[in-house]
């Protein structure tokens, strides 16, 4: 991969922390960052699993970034997409850590949590000291079984985008990507 000049590599799809050799992978990635300090590794996780080595790297190695799926600012708003108890697990895992790079927290917006977009922003930005990111629910995963209750109209999505844009501008946030 590095032969072709890749500098940013992301691990996503499923849950990376479930890999049976995740600690060995982290060891190898750490070696790579020592040899190639410009290389960065991003991880997309649901944040419910705790791996000490992973969280230690996120605190101490500037080459490691994380995006955590968190679909609300409290248990109720998050449960609509992730299930009951998810919010508490994620908060328990991240509250005790001080990341070297601001973590990105991604909210999947749907009808059940759309009214919480602004509260979510302030919770993530002010309390978790992270960067809020957003996407709309797609017809896949948990959304398939109750799509009619979750899907937003185009008008609703535009209204929400304007709220997010205003929040980003007010807080001088240019772009949130992983």
Image: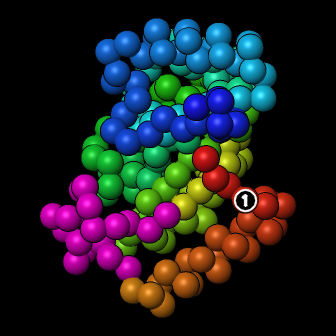
| Residue located 65% across and 30% down the image | 3
In the rendered image, the residue lying farthest to the left is: 145
* Residue 101: % across, % down: 73, 33
The correct choice, above or below, for 46 with respect to 60 in the image is: below
**Residue ID at (55%, 84%):** 158
Q: 10 Å neighbourhood of mark 1: few (<14), some, or many (≥20)?
A: few
- The picture places residue 4, in percent across and down from the top left corner, at 65, 37
Residue lying farthest front? 3
Residue 1 quadrant? top right
Left or right, residue 176 beside residue 80: right
Residue at 48% in and 35% down: 11
* Horizontal arrangement in the rendering, residue 36 relative to residue 91 (left or right): right
Q: Secondary structure at mark 1?
A: loop
- Nearest the viewer among 41 and 46 is 41
Quarter of image, res 98: top right
First to last magenta residue range: 135-152
Q: Residue at x 40, y 56 (%)?
A: 77
């Amino acid at each position: 991969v590095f032969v072709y000049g890749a500098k940013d590599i992301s691990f996503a799809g499923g849950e990376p922390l479930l890999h049976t050799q995740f600690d060995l992978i982290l060891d190898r990635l750490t070696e790579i960052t020592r040899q190639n300090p410009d290389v960065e590794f991003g991880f997309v996780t649901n944040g419910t699993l705790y791996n000490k080595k992973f969280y230690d790297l996120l605190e101490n190695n500037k080459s490691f970034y994380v995006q955590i799926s968190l679909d609300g600012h409290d248990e109720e708003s998050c449960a609509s997409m992730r299930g009951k108890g998810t919010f508490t697990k994620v908060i328990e895992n991240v509250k005790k850590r001080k990341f070297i790079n601001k973590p990105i927290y991604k909210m999947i917006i749907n009808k059940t949590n759309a009214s919480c977009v602004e509260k979510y922003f302030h919770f993530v930005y002010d309390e978790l000291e992270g960067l809020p990111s957003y996407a709309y629910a797609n017809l896949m995963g948990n959304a398939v079984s109750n799509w009619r209750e979750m899907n937003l109209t185009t008008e609703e999505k535009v209204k929400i985008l304007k709220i997010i844009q205003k929040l980003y501008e007010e807080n001088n946030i240019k772009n949130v990507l992983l």
